[in-house]
């Protein structure tokens, strides 16, 4: 039986290092240099998903102590930035990945994922900011689940990677995305 290169091999300890890296920066950097692009992206992906939930532990007590403010413009502003984030994230998702070498292809995949993840998490982060503006928790409670859903929709899952690979093959790409992102890092990288 062959080993599936797209199988999830995420280390909980290293995922936690990604969430709270400051005391462990050297160890976290060493780990990033020892695993494939896919492994790094998946560990980062899990840490992002966990961080959005962890923000609630910070926001709930803060929101209880903030005086409520009348900011009737907040729902419209949030809707605007959320729509912008979705459109921008989708635009980055449709851009073709560089295909001149496996190294550039892996870097292009990583960049495309991080941009999509940034726009996905911005739904929650705009809600986070709005909590401090209006003194109520609802903006984060609306933005966080939407961000989580979008984050998992664009995540580095086997199905998403295979879908991108199929599209690349149909377009005549010569390098394999799966081979590029599952390859061990090059020495000195």
Image: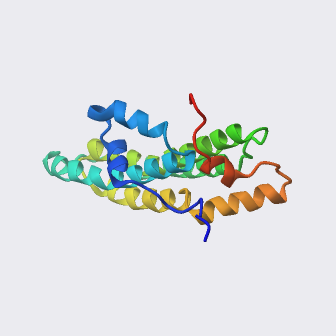
Quadrant housing the C terminus: top right
Q: Residue at x 77, y 48 (%)?
A: 175
Which quadrant of the rendered structure holds the N terminus? bottom right
Residue drawn at point x = 74 percent, y = 52 percent: 176
Quick check: 96 left or right of 7? right
Identity of the residue furthest to the bottom in this view: 1
Number of marks present in the image shown: 0
Residue furthest to the right in view is 172
For the view shown, which residue lies furthest in the left direction? Answer: 65
Above or below, 162 relative to 71 = below
**Residue at coordinates 56% horizontally, 28% vertically from top-left?**
188
Q: Is residue 12 left or right of residue 66?
A: right
User: How is colour applied across the structure in the image?
Assistant: rainbow
Point 60% across, 51% down: residue? 182
* Of residues 86 and 35, the one drawn nearer to the viewer in this rendering: 35
- Image x and y of residue 6, in percent: 58, 60
Instruction: Work out whether residue 35 can be spotted.
Output: yes
Residue 49 is situated, as x and y percent measured from the top left of the image, at: 40, 55
Percent of width and height locating residue 25: 34, 32
Q: Nearer the viewer, residue 99 or 95?
A: 99
Is the residue 100 above or below the residue 4 in the image? above
Q: Quick check: can you spot residue 78?
A: no
Instruction: Give residue 135's position: percent from left, percent from top.
Output: 23, 47
Seen from the viewer's position, the closer of residues 68 and 12 is 12
Q: Which of the 4 image quadrants contains residue 143?
A: bottom left
Task: State the residue lying farthest toward the top.
Answer: 188
Q: Nearer the viewer, residue 91 or 160?
A: 160
């Amino acid at each position: 039986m062959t080993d599936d290169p797209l199988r999830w091999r995420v280390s909980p300890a290293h995922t936690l290092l990604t969430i709270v890296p400051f005391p462990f920066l050297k160890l976290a950097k060493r780990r990033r240099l020892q695993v494939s692009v896919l492994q790094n992206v998946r560990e980062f992906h899990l840490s992002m998903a966990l961080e959005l939930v962890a923000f609630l532990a910070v926001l709930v007590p803060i929101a209880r102590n903030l005086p409520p403010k009348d900011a009737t413009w907040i729902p419209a502003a949030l809707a605007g930035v959320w729509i912008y984030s979705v459109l921008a994230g989708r635009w980055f998702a449709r851009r073709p990945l560089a295909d001149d070498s496996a190294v550039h292809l892996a870097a292009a995949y990583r960049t495309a994922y991080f941009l999509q993840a940034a726009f996905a998490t911005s739904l929650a982060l705009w809600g986070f900011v709005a909590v401090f503006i209006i003194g109520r928790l609802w903006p984060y409670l609306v933005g966080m689940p939407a961000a989580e859903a979008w984050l998992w929709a664009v995540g580095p899952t086997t199905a998403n990677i295979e879908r991108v690979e199929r599209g690349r093959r149909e377009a005549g790409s010569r390098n394999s995305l799966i081979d590029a992102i599952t390859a061990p890092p090059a020495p000195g990288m």
